[in-house]
Image: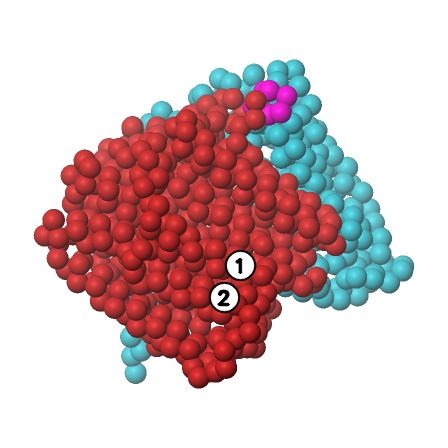
Chain colours: A cyan, B red
Amino acid sequence: MIRPLEHILIPVGLIAVGGLLGWSFFLAVTGEAGERLAAVALAHVPDSGVSNPVTSVLLNFRAYDTLLELAVLLAALLGIWSLGTAGSGFQPAASVLDGMVAGFVPLLILSAGYMLWVGAYAPGGAFQAGALLGAAGVMLALAGHRNAGLPSEGRLRLLVALGVFVFAMTGLLLMVVGDGFLTYPRGLAKWLILIIETAATLSIGATLAAAYLGGRPAAHPKSGEAT
Amino acid sequence: MIDALPLAVTLPLLGACAVTVSPAHARGLGLLAAVLTAASGVGVTAAVWSDGVLRVDLGGWGAPLGIALEADGLSAAFLVMANVVALAVSVYAGGYFKSESARHFWPLWLLLWSALNGLFLATDLFNLYVTLELLGLSAAALGALTGTREAVAANLRYLLVGLLGSMSYLLGVALVYAAYGVLDIGLVAEAIEPGPIAWTAMTLMIGGLILKAALFPMHFWLPPAHANAPAPVSAALSALVVKAAFYLALRLWLDVFAPVLNEAAANLLGILGAAAVVWGSWRALRADRLKLLAAYSTVAQMGYLFIAFPLLAATPPGLARDNLLAAVVLLALTHGFAKASFFLAAGMVQKTAGHDRIDELGGAAQALPAATFAIGLAGVALIGLPPSGTFLAKWMMLEQAMILGLWWWLFVMMVGTLLAAAYVFRVLSRAFNREPTPYRFVNDARTELPALLLGLIATFGLGIAAQPLWALLEQGAFG
């Protein structure tokens, strides 16, 4: 028996969507490349306080976008938390995995710090560094550490909100002193970007690890299991 | 130098941070942030009113390299409606949510508010995408706050549909950027020219947005998501979130894709709008629950807004077109106030009666005169009876449709209005069953007064005092 919705409408709809996607791709690839913004951006990189073009776009030219992206991450985590508490997690790992995790996690944290610093002049930056921190949290969770090495709920809340808070406050303070919202004064740009990126790294790392747990941190982690 | 535009976006963001860090004081901090945000939003509108179009280059780079925020008459009109409604919803939510759910409500709610203000003020196509993401994510999370199975399922679907809409929009933005190399709305409008790229980008972007605006037949996600959310969230979703998608579609239509429009696209939107009016009103009439009725009514009311597109496309520039545009905005604003009022009052009824089945509302609705009065006022605005803003707006749309000889839109709007009258009176007739006279008009000031005030604005404020809207829209919105 042919069910019209499942056998006709949905396949036809999907084929239409696929056709549209192929067509868009064709247009984007074959269309003549007009003047893009890359040239303008590269020309302004020396004024941005950092020499890595990606960081100068993310943290200076289009910093407002990045601020809202951090808010999106925060909204995602708060949404996860609103759905309930995290499961009980994995059982403690056997000694081999535990030993490996004990070696890897400090390395990941160290690499995150390196990524954060190097982002000013080479590929790297807050999102990459935060992803490494988040990966450290995921490793800890997989090895059976409850709460993925994250602090208690009060401090965790501080950590996840830190990025948006520092970013938005920096923007507002710059506006109050007369430079305009998120308009870094020359000379200070590098340090302001570093402060914002440091806060963002901590927030992104904590958010990703907390999101991996899949729920609010358990209220009373038993002593000995918390790290 | 304090610019009000970034304040309207960052104040709720900072408020969200504060309530995230200190959930024990979520209500106090949240209300404080709500008052400050609403003040900044109304301040922006007042500034546009007196000084004309406002524009701020964030980071001092200016378009095309940086991102700008801009408030013209159109965005200011939506901004002030959103901020007044959001403030009323906040006051209501202060009494509605108890400690545990309040901890989750306030940060997400302030993030949603920030996304709304950001969306109304944005001028950059990619920045608009980011605000859409923030809006959709926080809206779906808020809708699932009741925690029931239906609510979580409906809002998961809402989240996925919203993501699909955002992705479609983003694909359109990518095409525009690939072809023209700019993202600022003004610069894109200068560069765009008719051709396959512009048409495909328009289809993708407007298509994604009408999915988010729940235009028939893409409305399937709306009724369960809006009907199962907590009352203040339903009010915000129905009054503001779908309206934001409509605003963006209108903005793109007027400012970006104006050179590449054709009547076929406008007529398609109008036909879908007409189907939404008839189908949404019919389902609202048949709904057995008050909140489901309100949700289907939103589907119908969004339909009216899209009927305006063929009328706008057929009207030559001039006074008639300006009036028509103002009428559409007035319709959207009135629906924002009225639907928020309806949902807030319905939430009060549901809380008191323990259910919202329309057939069994008799005593419960009558025990709450203020809430019932708010539903009545909102109903007047939903039907479009004088002196509501809807009456004026529909009147001008009908007049223009007759002048243009497009009588079939007139027919659809008449049918929709009759059906709206039927579903509103169906609720009100249940509310006036034979029950003893109530003792008090207002039973719970914090929850009933916001609903009542929004209803009064929708019915009397926007109808009798609609003139300022025309003055506001002269700030850049009338081409």
Instruction: Tell me the residue at 70%/29% (across/down).
Output: A195
Instruction: Tell me the residue at 36%/25% (across/down).
Output: A35
Mark 1 on the same chain as mark 2: yes
Give the extent of the magenta segment: A175-180
B67 vs B85: above or below: above
Residue located farthest toward the right when viewing the structure as drawn: A224
Circle 1/circle 2 CB separation < 8 Å: yes
> As shown in the figure, which amino acid type bears the numbered disc 1?
Leu
Provide residue B463's location: percent of width, then percent of height. Answer: 33, 51
Residue holding disc 2: B370
Q: Chain of mark 1?
A: B
A10 vs B154, nearest the viewer: B154
Q: Main secondary structure of the magenta part?
A: loop
Instruction: Tell me the residue at 48%/75% (across/down).
Output: B365
- Would you say A71 lies left or right of B308 here? right
Residue holding disc 1: B449
